[in-house]
Amino acid sequence: MYTTKQKGFTIVELLIVIVVIAILAAISIVAFTGIQQRGRDSERASDVSNIVKSLTAYTTDGKAWPESGSAAATALQGYDIAPIPESIGAKLGSTAASSSSSTTYGYTVCPSGATGTAITGATISWVKEAGGGTETEETEVGTGC
């Protein structure tokens, strides 16, 4: 009589392979989430840099500081020397950015509460997703902030 040996994997071998695949998938998901956060942070930093450069050129050209975020967005989008894109202007708000709003940029004039006083600068605030949490960053442009 001939004995036939069955070929195949045991249940233990299959379970080990499944566990290894699950561990690799979990590691890659965590790494991918961090990459997405850094990408959004980089986009926000670039947008704020564009706003600062445009505001600097705008005010150096002898124009008055905008009094609110919406006024700044309107002025800078129509500014022919260093305009900002409409997608950035739509995110520029009139108050400081909060950690719950990662899609907008705050615009606060300097000196604060400058009614009747000449505006000499502005603070642009934005949210940074640092290590899974959120923190508000501020960038100053002009003087008096």
Image (cartoon, rainbow, N blue to C red):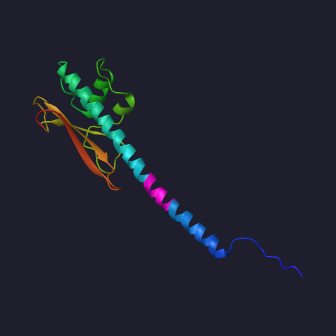
* Residue placed most toward the observer, 140 or 32: 32
x then y, percent, for residue 94: 26, 37
Q: Is residue 30 above or below residue 116?
A: below
Residue interval drawn in magenta:
25-32
Q: Could you tell whether 113 is left or right of 58 in the image? A: left
Q: Is residue 29 magenta?
A: yes
Could you tell me what secondary structure mostly forms the magenta stretch? helix
Kindly give the residue lying farthest to the bottom in the view shown.
1
Rendered-image quadrant of the C terminus: top left
Q: Residue at x 68, y 74 (%)?
A: 10
x then y, percent, for residue 36: 42, 48
x then y, percent, for residue 116: 11, 30
Q: Residue at x 32, y 21 (%)?
A: 78
x then y, percent, for residue 11: 66, 75
Q: Is residue 56 magenta?
A: no
Q: Could you tell whether 37 is left or right of 29 in the image? A: left
Q: Residue at x 82, y 76 (%)?
A: 4
Kindly give the residue lying farthest to the right in the view shown.
1
* Residue placed most toward the observer, 129 or 73: 129
